[in-house]
Amino acid sequence: MIDLYIDDLFSFFDKGGLVLYFVFFLAIILWTLLIERYVYVSFTYKKEKKAIIKELENIPSQTKFKDEIKRYFLHSSSFKLKSGLDLIKTMIMVCPLIGLLGTVTGMIEVFDVMAITGSSDVKSMANGVSMATIPTMAGMAVALSGILFEKKLELSIRYKIQKFELELSKVI
């Protein structure tokens, strides 16, 4: 049963050409980075935030540099939360471009078939047109799904930074 799905998957990759493998590789990297960021924001950051607040509660109330301490911890947390977002955004922008590279290579194949056969036979051109459209579609699908989750992640990070700033104001 699973062999049938694997055969269909390899058939799909063969129709899309070499560029489709590259789009798939980019998709795996993109989703690995997105999942890592979600895990960090959802679990690891909470533990770090609790540790920072616990540490700040031990600071004497007469400390001169309260604002600087608050700003330091806020910027440090903001940097940790936002790390990797620029790479994710770049990969989202690159995916459709790689898909368009598949369009170009597919159209080159169409023109090669036309040059070799000396005619514009529709059946002989169909493989090249298919090879041209599949990577473009895949690149767009990866980019669209990545944009949705990246924007949700970015809003979540912005919310957590604002919430942390309020919590720091209460402690310091």
Image (spheres, rainbow, N blue to C red):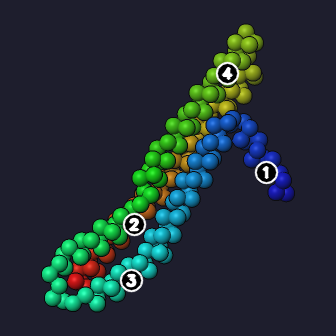
Q: Does residue 159 show up?
A: no
- Indicate the secondary structure of the residue bearing disc 1: helix
C-alpha separation, residue under disc 1 versus residue under disc 3: 47 Å
Lower sequence index among marks 4 and 2: 2
Q: Position of residue 84 (x, y in %)?
A: 44, 58
Residue 171 appears in which quarter of the rendering? bottom left
Quadrant for the N terminus, please: bottom right
The amino acid sitting under disc 2 is Lys
Lower sequence index among marks 3 and 4: 3
Which residue position holds label 2?
80
Q: Position of residue 35 (x, y in %)?
A: 54, 63
Which residue position holds label 3?
51
Which residue position holds label 4?
110
C-alpha separation, residue under disc 1 versus residue under disc 4: 27 Å
Between 91 and 149, which is closer to the camera in this rendering? 91
Horizontal relation, residue 89 to residue 158: left or right = right
Between 50 and 13, which is closer to the camera in this rendering? 50
Mark 4, residues whose alpha carbon is within 10 Å: few (<14), some, or many (≥20)? Answer: many
Which residue position holds label 1?
6
- Indicate the secondary structure of the residue bearing disc 4: helix
C-alpha separation, residue under disc 2 versus residue under disc 1: 39 Å
The amino acid sitting under disc 3 is Ala
Numbered tag placed on residue 15 in the rendering: none
Quadrant for the C terminus, please: bottom left
- Indicate the secondary structure of the residue bearing disc 3: helix
